[in-house]
Image (tube, rainbow, N blue to C red):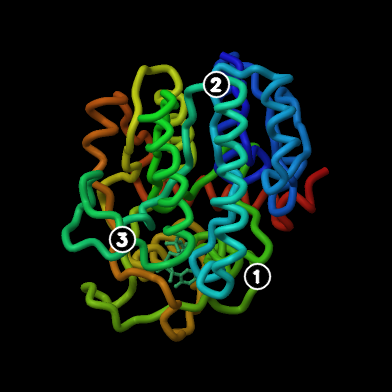
Amino acid sequence: MKILLTGGSGYIGSVTTELLCNDGHEVVVFDNLERGHREAVDPRARLVVGDLREPRPIRETMQAVQPDAVVHFAAYALVGESMQNPLQYFENNVGGGLHLLSALLHTGVKKIIFSSTCATYGEPAVLPMTEDLPQRPTNPYGESKLMLETALRWEQQRRGIQPVFLRYFNACGATEKYGEDHEPETHLIPNVLKVALGQTPAVPVFGDDYPTPDGTCIRDYIHIVDLARAHILALEQDVTGPFNLGTGTGFSVQQVIDACREVTGHDIPVHISPRRPGDPPSLVAGAEKAKRVLGWAPQFAELKTIVRHAWEWHQAHPQGYAGRE
Ligand code: UDP
């Protein structure tokens, strides 16, 4: 297949590009390199530098490439930042996404795999979370992803777009080549590993008074390779609609820190900090639909394996991509 992939210089996009190239697919990455890294784009892919917030570059690229399908990652993805600056999220995630949709319609490309999120559900009334739960986001990030899902769904009815919404839980881990490098880093596992690397003195724990067994938030941590594989399965099959992607097991912030202590052998000091606005207490995936319909199954569901892969990558790239030869 010939795939146009937006956001291929980011964390999930880089690994999905790598796996698509491994499988022999032709990949064109469309990316503005604002938050990603040129070094994270697999050299087997072609990189087109462009910004989705402008309508023309993506339309021209789509017309020139004539892909069989699109995989759309390019977006801002931080809950906390979205609470500080909602407009930024709507301009990029919704505005940029609509330019991409318009380019799809203009070129006649039907299939799009959209990088969505469990944040579209907001605070779920029941766990684990299945795809039929109401979507009531509690932050602009989740809302922006839901808005693009909605636009895609209407154009599915109207003009036969074939969208797949992959609603991720917490992406983590690494391949040998590609890992997580954000500036500033806000995600739990890389922040804990920075302490183990001696780059920061302690990791903040954002709230220890949540209604969970140890008082810290519970999330479903899913290996980046398992996430990437779900995209490939969704591309290969004649499917549309939402799929939750998680392991189905939740771990608290405290449990993640303990796993990092075990894997790294460092004692990783913590400091208890105020809650981070917009964080729901517990998010755990019900991913039976992805298993049943896509034939997907996480291969690296063990938290320690995920942490070990992340740790190996961070040790090899202590300064992230900036330190790469
Ligand atoms: N978290 C934390 N300290 C950090 C980073 C994150 O306590 O330095 C918590 C955060 O409040 C949330 C969980 O870890 O409960 C996962 O956060 P992350 O930012 O990794 O992913 P999110 O769930 O926001 O997508």
The local secondary structure at tag 2 comes to loop
Q: Position of residue 215 (x, y in %)?
A: 28, 78
* Mark 1 vs 3, N-terminal side: 3
The residue pinned by badge 2 equals 109
The dot on residue 136 is 3
- Foreground mark, 1 or 2, reads 2
Q: Is residue 44 shown left or right of residue 260?
A: right
Residue 176 shows up from this direction:
no
Side (left or right) of 123 relative to 323: left
Q: Which residue is mark 1?
A: 198
Q: Secondary structure at mark 3?
A: loop
Front label number (1 vs 3): 3
> Which circle's residue, 1 or 2, is located before the other in the chain?
2
**120 in relation to 192, above or below:** above
Q: Is residue 121 visible?
A: yes
Q: Position of residue 286 (x, y in %)?
A: 23, 45
**Residue type (three-letter) at the residue carrying disc 3:** Arg
Using the image as rendered, state which of residue 124 and residue 92 is in the foreground.
92
Q: Amino acid at mark 1?
A: Gly
Give the side of residue 240 with respect to residue 87, left or right: left
